[in-house]
Image (cartoon, rainbow, N blue to C red):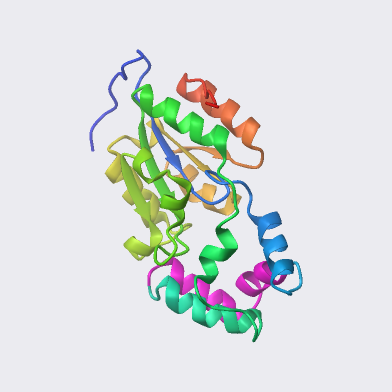
Amino acid sequence: MSHSTASPNGHEQRGLILDFAGVLTANPNAIHRAWCVSQGLEPGAWRSTLNDHPEGRRLYAALEIGEIGQAEWNEGTAVLLGEHVDPVNLMGRAWAEVPPARRMIALARAARAAGHRLALLSNSFGLDPFNPYEHVGIWGLFDVHVVSELEGLAKPDPAIYRLALERIGLLAERCVFVDDHEVNLLPAAELGIATVHMADEDMAVAKLEALLGVTAELTV
């Protein structure tokens, strides 16, 4: 692992490690509730099926680490949601209207332009047939990618954070990690990585601007 160097703007080079869903996208809960209603389901059906139903939890955990693919997950989860739910591109249909987090993406672009290194550290929800990273258009923004489905590891397993540090090539103390789930921040903090909880996009961006010495500027 290399030691940090000066970035082109004169600041010491930092590593910015970003989660995807809820960090580079808006919080998806409202969109998922609206989608459920559009499908004739209870508003909370998506969340309860993935989080509370034992088979729903099993399927999602298997998807995260690549034990099953998204198409297989679509088939299994559609049945749990309701007999009338079409499994074809289920994940893509539920996620299609979740908007990008425009200020956080602008912050990430500013950080990279300033010479900081960027890593995507994401618990996957499948790549095919729906690729959420390409859908939002952020894949090419990152120097390195650590996606749970491709690694067979998922947050909060400490090993996936160590893998992110290895790939980004900077000491933990030079890195900052952003996630919307506090449970995922704890292993990063234990490794010495600074953490920012994405509970509010404006507040999180302001903290990162101060840490990285950059300004997030939205383009029209």
Q: Is residue 143 left or right of residue 16?
A: left
Q: Residue at x 37, y 36 (%)?
A: 118
Q: Residue at x 59, y 64 (%)?
A: 94
Quadrant including the N terminus: top left
Q: Is residue 33 left or right of residue 72?
A: right
Quadrant including the C terminus: top right
Tell me the magenta residue range: 44-66
Based on the picture, tell me whether residue 18 belongs to the magenta stretch: no
Q: Residue at x 50, y 24 (%)?
A: 211
Question: Could you tell me residue 57's position as x and y percent?
Answer: 57, 74
Q: Which image quadrant for residue 142?
A: top left
In-front residue for pair 42/67: 42
In-front residue for pair 86/159: 86
Q: Is residue 206 left or right of residue 173?
A: right
Based on the picture, tell me whether residue 45 belongs to the magenta stretch: yes
Residue farthest to the bottom, as pictured = 83
Q: Residue at x 30, y 18 (%)?
A: 6
In-front residue for pair 192/118: 118
Q: Is residue 132 above or below residue 219?
A: below
Question: Could you tell me residue 85's position as x and y percent?
Answer: 62, 79
Question: Could you tell me residue 58's position as x and y percent?
Answer: 52, 77
Q: Is residue 102 above or below residue 62?
A: above
Residue farthest to the left, as pictured = 2
